[in-house]
Image: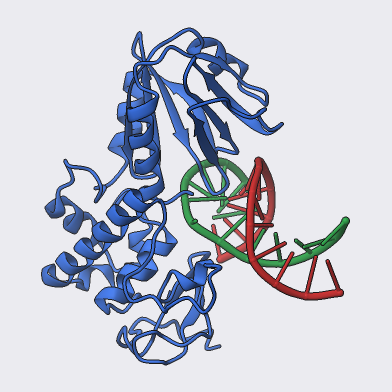
Chain colours: A blue, B green, C red
Amino acid sequence: MPEGHSIHRVARVHRRWLVGRHFTADSPQGRPEVARVLSGRTLMGVDAHGKHLFHVFEGDVRLHIHLGLFGRIRHFRSQAPVPSAACRLRLTSAAASLHLSGPSACELLTPEAEATLRARLGEDPLRADASPDRAYARLTQGRMPLAQALLDQGRIAGVGNIVRAEALFLVGLPPLLPACELDREAFESLWAAMRTLLEDGARDGLIVTPGAPPLPSPGRKRAERFCVYGRTGLPCPRCGAKVKGRTLAARTLYSCAACQGVDRLRKPRRAR
DNA sequence: TGTGCATGTTAAA
DNA sequence: TTAACCTGCACAA
């Protein structure tokens, strides 16, 4: 679920189906105090910023959710199933309900705490108020590899491992380029690629990269929706060279060395 | 049935 | 830089 497109999709669905409803809340696993406060309140609005979700209930009670790596959030318009044992928060109304499990954050925030949190987040390509100027300024600070800077949520918010790999591939940028060496023109292409991937993903519910290899079989596995992500050792759909997967700052980075230029900052120590 | 891995973040060393 | 945490899935056996 958890790159920015999924979060914005959830926000849109909740705006349409859950806002304006009066909920009772419970927490089969773990957050009785959150449920107690939310119970009996009407949902007034939902906002998404990067990978963070903010639900505003009457009385300016604000719920912050971050799905982390494993979180799931589901909604039901008719009868909901029995919540799983791991269900952290359940919101129930007459006509719709929500089940949340496995989130890394499910907490109530004061408006001040929410503002502090949001101030730490960078520009979100899916938000109408996103400023490419600010995004460029933040992204290109320092000599950190571009691929690593893209995952820094304080620079650009909502981009995850899939979008960074696919966007860098689509634009043909070397992932290890020092961030400060990214010129404005290349940034514009990269920003547009990320925004398109995220917007299409939010609309369709999943990311499918344009140019991804056609499905060999009807079952669509993840690696078949992408050009390089999760495709270590498979042929690059553009040039046929083998896609490379390696670890950068504890995350797997996928790229095609032939299509994405020379990796200029390769560390001398581990040659693989 | 069991194992490893994953779209993420944080705290500790 | 590393481990830890949370859950579900693909794949091996």
The relative height of residue A209 versus residue B9 in the rendered view (above or below) is below
Residue occupying image coordinates x 68% and y 34%: A86
Give the image location of residue A160, x and y in percent. 41, 57
Left or right, A46 with reference to A189: right
Image vertical order of residue B9 relative to residue A222, above or below: above
* Residue A257 visible to the viewer: yes
Residue A158 visible, this angle: no
Of residues A87 and A253, the one nearer the viewer is A87
Quadrant of the image occupied by residue A140: bottom left
Identify which residue, B1 or A142, lies in the foreground. B1
Figure quadrant of residue A89: top right
Q: Position of residue A104 (x, y in %)?
A: 54, 38
Across and down, in percent, residue A245 comes to: 50, 78
User: Residue sitting at 48 percent across and 28 percent down?
Assistant: A77
Q: Residue at x 58, y 27 (%)?
A: A80
Q: Residue at x 38, y 87 (%)?
A: A257
Q: Count how many numbered circles sit on residues in the image.
A: 0
In this rendering, position of residue A161 left or right of residue A86: left
Q: Position of residue A2 (x, y in %)?
A: 46, 49
- Seen from the viewer's position, the closer of residues A212 and A165 is A212
Apparent side of residue A140 relative to residue A146 in the rendered image (left or right): left
Is residue A150 rendered to the left or right of residue A196?
right
Q: Is residue A192 above or below residue A216?
A: above
Quadrant of the image containing the C terminus of chain A: bottom right
